[in-house]
Image (spheres, rainbow, N blue to C red):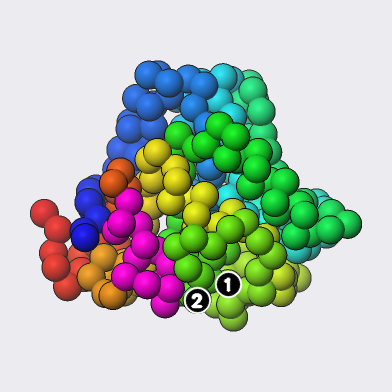
Amino acid sequence: MSLRVEVFDDDEWADRVVDRWATVMRDAPASRLCLPTGETPVPVYAEAARRIDFTAATVFVLDEFDLPFGHLARCDSMLRRDFLDRLTALPAAIHLMNPAAPDPEAECRRYESVVEVGGLDLTLLGLGANGHLGLNEPGSTADAPARVVRLAPSTIEAASRYAQDAEPVIGMTLGMRSILASNAIWLLVAGAHKGEILDRTLNGPIGPDVPASFLRHHPNAVVLADRSAAEHLATPVA
Ligand code: PGA
């Protein structure tokens, strides 16, 4: 199966993603949103915070690193800094994962059950350099539940970009199962450095080696890519 790809000029990419997001939130203000952190969504969040009213929405963080609370590389810190702190009014509910919970696996089950009670209307995702989604690292199956995960080396390296002293080894993530159960999924891909893994996501074998490839089985998933990420695709996109 194939995954729909929409490509926008680099300098318009964030605006076009937010155009779509604004439409979703206007039509369904109480949307249940699963949101990623990392570099990719930063310009999208900045623009969305200016243009969209999220006060009726419910937000779920996609994943979390096992770092001390308040650490700059933690996903909740990034979500606050890049998105929540920019809003004039907070969403109705914000759900976070707590790696410091006494029983981390039970914390994952708790989180997953909160997600699954009402499901997810829209999940935004970044694309890991190794094809991960959230912290569903290579080797993750399509039915993987929310769980504690050991991080791939490239993920640890990426985390150290967010804060110099960040070397998380363990994380928690919503599983592929919950992600793939989302009504709509937008895979956000920006920058030439994502070109090769985007190509594998779209054109390589579907399977655990590139967890993002499972999106090709989803009926309502789309890649929203900037031209830099898309220009070297083996199968060019218009
Ligand atoms: P990035 O990370 O947006 O910082 O490139 C994406 C990811 O690893 O999921």
As drawn, 200 above or below 76: below
- Percent position (x, y) of residue 33? 52, 36
Q: Position of residue 96 (x, y in %)?
A: 70, 44
Is the N terminus in the top left, top right, bottom left or bottom right quadrant?
Answer: bottom left
Q: Is residue 223 above or below residue 129?
A: above
For label 1, the crowd category at 10 Å Cα-Cα, with few meaning under 14, some 14 to 19 and many 20 or more, is: some
Please name the residue shown 72% across and 46% down the image.
110
Q: Is residue 209 magenta?
A: yes
Say which amino acid is labelled 1: Thr
At 22% from the left edge and 51% from the top edge, which residue is drawn? 4
Q: Position of residue 7 (x, y in %)?
A: 23, 51
Separation of residues labelled 1 and 2 (CA atoms): 14 Å
Residue 151 in the figure: left or right of residue 188: right
Residue labelled with disc 1: 155
Sequence order check, earlier mark of 1 and 2:
2
Residue extending farthest right: 102
Q: Tell me the magenta residue range.
A: 206-218
